Each structure stands twice: as structure tokens, then as C-alpha cells.
Image (cartoon, rainbow, N blue to C red):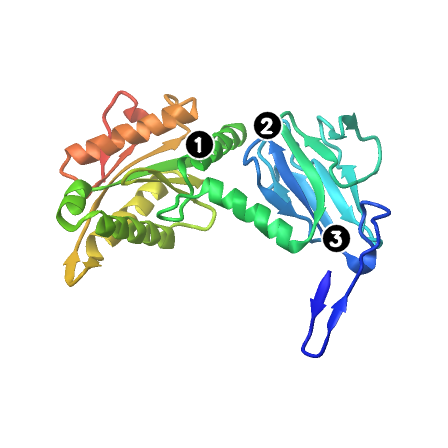
């Protein structure tokens, strides 16, 4: 390695690594990388002295695999720069390199850690630059290039996870589908670059309204999707109306012209006796969106549990 300063060039020769564990004085960062389960490729940096893993909201790393306990496992950082893995009394156990833990396991670079049925993570030492690069690659794979929102792939994975969590804990979950009205005419009149501007600005306006914990994704074309945990239909309707009002009253500046582009929104929530899968949840929201379009656009239609016979309610 060559190190530069203003007065001289210093050449530092690194000695061969005697161990995969870094010296405490030259501590490199450690992380877990998702190999199997939800959000493959996600990087979890181990920055705290103790990192907890589980389904509980208080977990440092919250994972929604059905086989994961609320408090499943923990990782402790040692004074010598190493890390130890412990099971936290989980129902299905914690495994390191296919061996179920009976006590503490000192983690080595490349170890495979399994929690739950599907979730496998790789323990890895690396510097901050490597971890940042891996995180950027993960983000790039799950982000829409134009808007910067999550893409359809991430939405599908996250919706399955949130739907499972909602059903298991009997908690509300809502989904909004948002469609820009007459967007084709925007492209035809102003060109696709201006159309892209409208999409980006609309995405940002929606992002400014929703909560941090809500999931906003580009569903496709001029459609967006919002997934809201612990949100019943009434509160989802209020959120949808805020989004509709904001877009209807905030024009886009295209060259020297102001243009208002409205949205139509279809919303649905569970619990709903007619909805038993994430796909049915999306279908129900799509049906409500269709009704919003048919009702003249620039409006919100939500579907109550009693509406599963096909009678959505206009807001």
C-alpha cells in the first residue's frame, strides 16, 4: 500500500494474514449479507456491541421469515475485534455452517448463519468501502432508475413479508394503487422527458406525505403503490385523499407552463374475509383503482370487507 502526504511518500508493506479475524488495532467492519430469504443481497452492518435478530420491532435486524422467533439470535462484538453468535432461546434454533448452536459460536469470515426456515446470512469482514459498495449494488437492484423508488421486485418481496406478518399477528395492512390520470397525453403533448419529470415529481410528493415505515414503489408505467403496516381502511382513505389533494393542487412547471396532473387511487385493507393472499390484496386494490378511473378520475375509491361482492366505496 502506498500512502501519500504533503511531504513524502510512505510505503507500507502488509504482512500475510495469520487469521481471518482482524486485529483489534486495525479493526475492519463486519456485516451480515442476506443469501437466502427476503431481500437477498441486503447488507446488515454490525456496528453495535450487541446486535439482535428476530421478528420483534425492537430487533436490530428485523426479519419476517415465519420460522423466526420474536427474539431469535444475537451477535456480540468482542474486545479483540471478533464476534460471537448466540441463540436467544428461539423455537427453531440458530445454525452456523449447518450445525445447531448449543452455546456460543465464534464467527469466522464466510460463516453461514441460518435463522428460521429460509433465511441464511453470510458473516463477512470487510472495510467500510466494501460494505458501502455491496449496499449500493443491493440498492441499485431494488430501485427504479427513473424515480429512485423501490421497484416491482422489491415490492413483491416486501408485500409477501408484510402480508404474512399482518395475518400472523392479526394487525391491519393497507395497500394503495396510484395512477396518474391522462398521462399518455402528457407524453404526447410535452414529450417523454417532460413526462419523466412529472413521474419523478409525483413520486417525490407522495414520498413526502407517507410515513418512513411505509413502502412506496413504482408499480409500473405511471402507477405507484404504497404499502402501509398497521393502517386500517379509514386511515388509508385519509392518506389517499391527502395524496390526491396534493397532486391536484400542486402544478408541475414544464418549460414556462404550469400543468396539473391528477391521480386516481384505489385502496384496500386487511383483515378482509375475501382476501387470503398478497395477490388477492393487489387484485382488490386494482379493482378499486379501476372504479376510480371509471368514476371520472381524480378521486379515491376504497374497498371495505363487506364490499367483496364488488361494490367499492367512493371517498
- Residue 314 on image: x %, y %: 21, 36
- Residue 171 on image: x %, y %: 48, 34
Q: Residue at x 29, y 38 (%)?
A: 221
Badge 3 density bin: few <14, some 14–19, many ≥20, Cα 10 Å? few
**What's the distance in space between the residues labelled 3 and 2, CA to CA?**
27 Å
- Residue 291 on image: x %, y %: 20, 31
Q: Nearer the viewer, residue 259 or 92?
A: 259
Q: Residue at x 35, y 29 (%)?
A: 282
Closer mark to the observer between disc 1 and disc 3: 1
Q: Nearer the viewer, residue 272 or 67?
A: 67
The residue indicated by pointer 2 is 66
Q: Residue at x 31, y 25 (%)?
A: 306
The residue indicated by pointer 1 is 156
**What's the distance in space between the residues labelled 1 and 3, CA to CA?**
33 Å
Badge 1 density bin: few <14, some 14–19, many ≥20, Cα 10 Å? some
Q: On the picture, is 198 further left or further right than 137?
A: left
Amino acid at each position: 500500500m502506498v500512502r501519500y502526504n504533503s511531504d513524502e511518500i510512505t510505503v507500507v508493506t502488509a504482512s500475510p494474514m495469520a487469521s481471518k479475524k482482524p486485529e483489534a488495532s486495525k479493526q475492519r467492519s463486519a456485516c451480515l449479507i442476506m443469501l437466502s430469504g427476503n431481500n437477498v443481497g441486503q447488507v446488515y452492518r454490525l456496528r453495535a456491541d450487541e446486535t439482535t435478530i428476530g421478528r420483534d420491532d425492537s430487533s436490530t435486524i428485523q426479519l419476517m421469515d415465519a420460522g423466526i422467533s420474536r427474539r431469535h439470535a444475537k451477535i456480540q462484538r468482542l474486545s479483540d475485534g471478533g464476534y460471537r453468535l448466540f441463540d436467544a432461546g428461539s423455537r427453531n434454533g440458530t445454525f452456523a455452517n449447518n450445525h445447531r448452536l448449543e452455546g456460543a459460536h465464534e464467527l469466522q469470515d464466510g460463516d453461514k448463519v441460518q435463522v428460521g426456515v429460509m433465511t441464511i446470512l453470510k458473516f463477512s469482514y470487510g472495510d467500510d468501502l466494501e460494505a458501502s459498495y455491496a449496499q449500493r449494488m443491493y440498492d441499485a437492484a431494488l430501485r427504479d432508475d427513473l424515480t429512485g423508488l423501490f421497484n416491482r421486485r422489491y415490492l413483491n418481496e416486501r408485500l409477501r413479508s408484510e402480508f404474512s406478518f399482518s395475518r400472523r399477528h392479526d394487525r391491519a395492512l393497507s395497500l394503495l394503487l396510484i395512477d396518474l390520470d391522462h398521462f399518455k397525453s402528457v407524453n404526447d403533448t410535452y414529450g417523454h422527458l417532460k413526462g419523466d419529470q412529472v413521474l419523478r415529481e409525483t413520486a417525490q410528493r407522495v414520498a413526502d406525505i407517507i410515513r418512513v415505515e411505509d413502502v412506496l414503489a413504482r408499480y409500473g408505467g405511471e402507477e405507484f403503490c404504497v404499502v402501509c403496516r398497521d393502517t386500517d381502511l379509514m386511515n388509508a382513505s385519509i392518506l389517499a385523499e391527502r395524496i390526491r389533494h396534493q397532486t391536484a393542487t400542486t402544478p408541475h412547471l414544464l418549460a414556462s407552463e404550469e400543468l396539473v396532473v391528477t391521480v386516481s387511487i384505489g385502496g384496500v385493507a386487511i383483515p378482509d374475509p375475501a382476501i387470503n393472499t398478497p395477490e388477492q390484496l393487489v387484485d382488490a386494490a386494482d379493482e378499486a383503482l379501476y372504479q376510480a378511473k371509471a368514476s371520472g378520475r381524480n378521486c379515491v375509491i376504497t374497498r371495505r370487507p363487506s364490499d367483496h361482492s364488488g361494490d367499492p366505496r367512493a371517498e
